[in-house]
Amino acid sequence: MKNIKLTYALVALFAYSIAQSLNNEAVAQELNCTVVLNSDQLFAQQNTDAANLSQLKNVITDFMNARRWTSDNYTPEERINCRLNINLLRSVSQGSYEANAQLIVLRPVFGSTYETVVFSYVDRNFDFGYLPNNPMYFNENNYTDELTQTLAFYAYLILAADYDSFSKLGGNPHVQRAFLLSNMASARSGVAKGWVSSDNTLRNRYWLVENLMDQQLTPFREGMYNYHRLALDAFAQNPVAARKQVMNVLTTIQQVNQLKPVSVLVNSFFDAKGQEIYKIMREAPKDERQKVFNMLSQLDPTQTELYRKLLK
């Protein structure tokens, strides 16, 4: 009898171990970030160790993808696809780089194979230091170094953009974390350009998170849910209703733009969505296309020629 009980106990323990293993495998990190490191300009100016740059790329990739940024459970299929394109401009001293970067956040659209760009941001002040074989330590409560602080800031921006697209203001906890990281960086003496409020372009990291926290821009962030869940995700089933939602979102952005005429958040939206909005609206009735053109040419004048095709 004892042998039978022992056998059952071993079987139960084995089954539990398998279940735990499967559960652990099903829980993944949140980000699936592709890192591209462009060093052409750097190599053209000076001798640079390619192996060091390869290591740098791997370290950044691991930092973004191997870390758990939230307590939420993700399956591998649910990870957020994103891209970080880093353009190294020059090395001012050993292990010290001047660079710019582009962060792109992607999201699947329901009922299709299409991935939409939720967020696109160009950081013209991605300057940092990194020495080979140095591990990257990140402490959310303390500034460690420029590279880890900026990458962690990006990670929370990615999460905020993704969560905002699935529920109204769902990204708030991640915006708050990005805000705290920005505050820590800007409070330091000798603060880097990317964190200063005095940036004349109003497009650096300081102003990006300031926009996300600004109550005047809350309707814009709520519009990100309407655009993605009520327009894009519904487009295949009801394109007429989806286009109406897009027009409502543009009207909201127009109102926000009157309150905050120079907003990096609004500019980044049209960087990401200009082509997409054109494709969505080109099959709309003529009066709708005219109305959308009037709004877009005022909100995003840099792409006016693209939007003018709506009038044909």
Image (tube, rainbow, N blue to C red):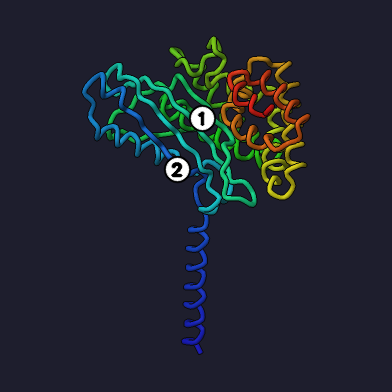
Q: Is residue 210 visible?
A: no
Q: Residue at x 52, y 14 (%)?
A: 196
Earlier sequence position, callout 2 versus callout 1? 2
Disc 1 is placed on an element classified as: helix
Which three-letter amino acid code belongs to the residue tagged 1? Phe
| Nearest to the observer: residue 109 or residue 158 | 109
Q: Position of residue 293 (x, y in %)?
A: 70, 24
Q: Residue at x 36, y 32 (%)?
A: 37
Q: Position of residue 308 (x, y in %)?
A: 64, 24
Q: Residue at x 68, y 48 (%)?
A: 236
- Numbered mark located on residue 153 in the image: 1
As drawn, is 194 to the left or to the right of 72?
left
- Numbered mark located on residue 62 in the image: none
Which three-letter amino acid code belongs to the residue tagged 2? Asn
The residue lying furthest to the bottom in this view is 1
- Residue bearing mark 2: 65
Disc 2 is placed on an element classified as: helix
